[in-house]
Amino acid sequence: MNIDSQPQEMDLSLGEQAYIKLRDLLRSGEIPAGKRLGEKEICDRFDMSRTPVREAFRQLLSDGLLSTSPGGRIIVAEIDLAKVEEIYDMREAVEGLAARLATKNARTPDLMVIESILEEQRTGIASEASFLGVNDRFHGAIYQLSGNRYVQRSAEVLLNSASMIRGSTHGRYDYESWSLSDHEAVFQAMCNGDTAGAEQAMLRHIRRGRWQRTRLLVAENDI
């Protein structure tokens, strides 16, 4: 199983390309929550026609990254504490299962790919943005190695939603003191073929991230 392959832009339809470009802008926080989005604005930004942009809007509405205002206009979805708790409830369920299945399926070449991602984190991460890129590849490799299409799809949607939370807490998230040790624990359990151990290590990891993000959101909104 090749867990290190990424689709090339030339292999994607224009709708898929528009989706990825707009999704990444939303995930990075470059387009803030609550902002109204118009088709023409995005068409001009991506130099695309309305059809692929409409496809991207439909998919992002389905993913929950976009929503509609009472007047029917498309806006960037707002992230509140209740939604964050729901996202993390689902992440615990899906990512725990992904770690269990990935451990069952893992072969030496698969583990070597994951270790190469970990090695980047071991050598030091210069910024939160760099960390998030490595972090997403680590989790993405586990999703793919799970071999379960429903887990993969659910995990992708949840990761997109979690990225919206990141935009609200950017620059204040403490990843340096615990993320690497958590990833190492998941990886070690996978190397040992310990499916239950990998699942529990992943659950601890997601719960620690949940505490960090929700605490920051509560402090920011003085709830």
Image (tube, rainbow, N blue to C red):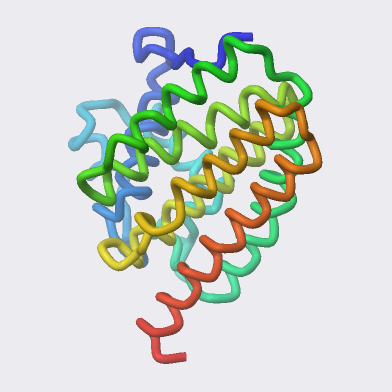
Residue occupying image coordinates x 35% and y 82%? 220
> Residue 42: x, y in percent?
26, 40
> Quick check: 135 left or right of 100?
left
> Quick check: 54 left or right of 131?
right
- In the image, farthest residue toward the bottom: 222
Residue occupying image coordinates x 71% and y 40%? 198
Please state which of residues 169 and 209 is positioned toward the viewer in this rendering: 209
> Residue 221: x, y in percent?
39, 85
Residue occupying image coordinates x 43% and y 32%? 118
> Residue 81: x, y in percent?
53, 76
Residue occupying image coordinates x 42% and y 22%? 116
Examine the image and state in which quarter residue 175 appears: bottom left
Residue 197 vertical position relative to residue 153 in the rendered view, above or below: below
Quarter in which the N terminus is drawn: top right
Examine the image and state in which quarter residue 31 appears: bottom left
> Residue 91: x, y in percent?
64, 52
Please state which of residues 177 and 152 is positioned toward the viewer in this rendering: 177
Please state which of residues 49 and 137 is positioned toward the viewer in this rendering: 137
